[in-house]
Image (cartoon, rainbow, N blue to C red):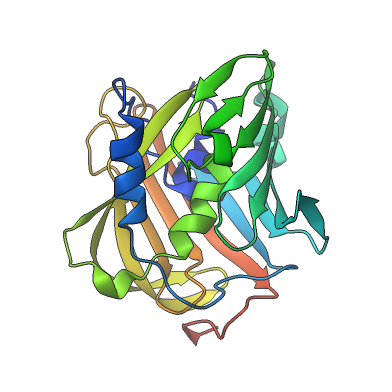
Amino acid sequence: MKRIGIVFVVLFGLSMLHAQKPEIKRIEQGLSELHRVDYPVFQKGERIEYLVHYGIVDAGKAVIEIKNETHYYGSREALHVVGKGRSVGAFDWVFKVRDTYESFIDAKNIHPYEFKRDVSEGGYEFKQHYKFEQDENKVKTEKGEVKQVPYGIQDMISAFYFARTLDLSKYKKGEIIVLQAFLDGKIEPLKIRYTGRETIKTKAGKFKCLKFEPIVQPGRVFDEPGDLTVYITDDKNRIPVLAKAGILVGSVKMELTNYSQLAHPVAIVSK
């Protein structure tokens, strides 16, 4: 059985494609050409909650929030983001999940200074701890390894928040947006295709949404490249409302159940 931790991969839009000896300058150039909005998309205190379905079973809950705290890395203010996932109900008896992800993200440029990952899934456990030196194009791992990375490289959590700051009015339907993240000791391209608009109903209500397909590698977790779909609110918040994935051993769905302290009015049609 694939680890239920895939729900975080679904939520944060990671494509799991390996970069082949990326050229740092070329990657930096691509990152600098991304279009971003000129207003704050999120704020301290924001909290978003999800219910995870594995097939027809309610398998888990996920929460991601920006802590109401103040942190500095040198003179730069950083946001402290924490994401947690856990199994629930009968699923908790057969496949216990307790995952925690943390990222300290530059409040202005939205790139990470530090990332922590503590995974416990059905007896499988591991931890990661990355320290990013953005100005020196380096990241240090929990193993003491030092890797060269492009300026502006993301981690699994910060990539989610950076993606929310993109000015989607600058992209056409069908266009592919490429981010870069440091994941499992490697630089990974995160490719997302914008596919249109749709109104989506969830446990939290009915929302006007933008539809995206993260481009994934078939055969590893997903059957086909289009087996992952993510819907985000068509407003200034850009919060994920629904993520659906057809994986090799069934299907996973994550739907919005609650939200609070959003920076802007949400595009809700009805409760």
Q: Is residue 196 left or right of residue 63?
A: left
Residue 129 placement: quadrant: top right
The one nearer the camera, 20 or 197, is 20
Residue 258: % across, % down: 65, 68
Residue reaching furthest right? Answer: 69
Residue 149: % across, % down: 46, 31
Residue 140: % across, % down: 63, 24
The one nearer the camera, 211 or 93, is 211
Task: Identify the residue shown where x is 36% and y is 70%.
Answer: 167
Measured along the vertical axis of the image, is residue 98 above or below residue 243? above
Residue 69 placement: quadrant: bottom right
Residue 261: % across, % down: 70, 75
Q: Is residue 250 left or right of residue 126?
A: left
- Residue 57 seen: no
Task: Identify the residue shown where x is 46% and y is 78%.
Answer: 206
Image quadrant where one finds the C terminus: bottom right
- Residue 133 seen: yes
Measured along the vertical axis of the image, is residue 149 above or below residue 69? above
Q: Is residue 168 left or right of residue 88?
A: left
The one nearer the camera, 206 or 69, is 69
Task: Identify the residue shown where x is 64% and y is 21%.
Answer: 141
How many numbered discs? 0
Task: Identify the residue shown where x is 69% and y is 19%.
Answer: 142
Measured along the vertical axis of the image, is residue 102 above or below residue 266? above
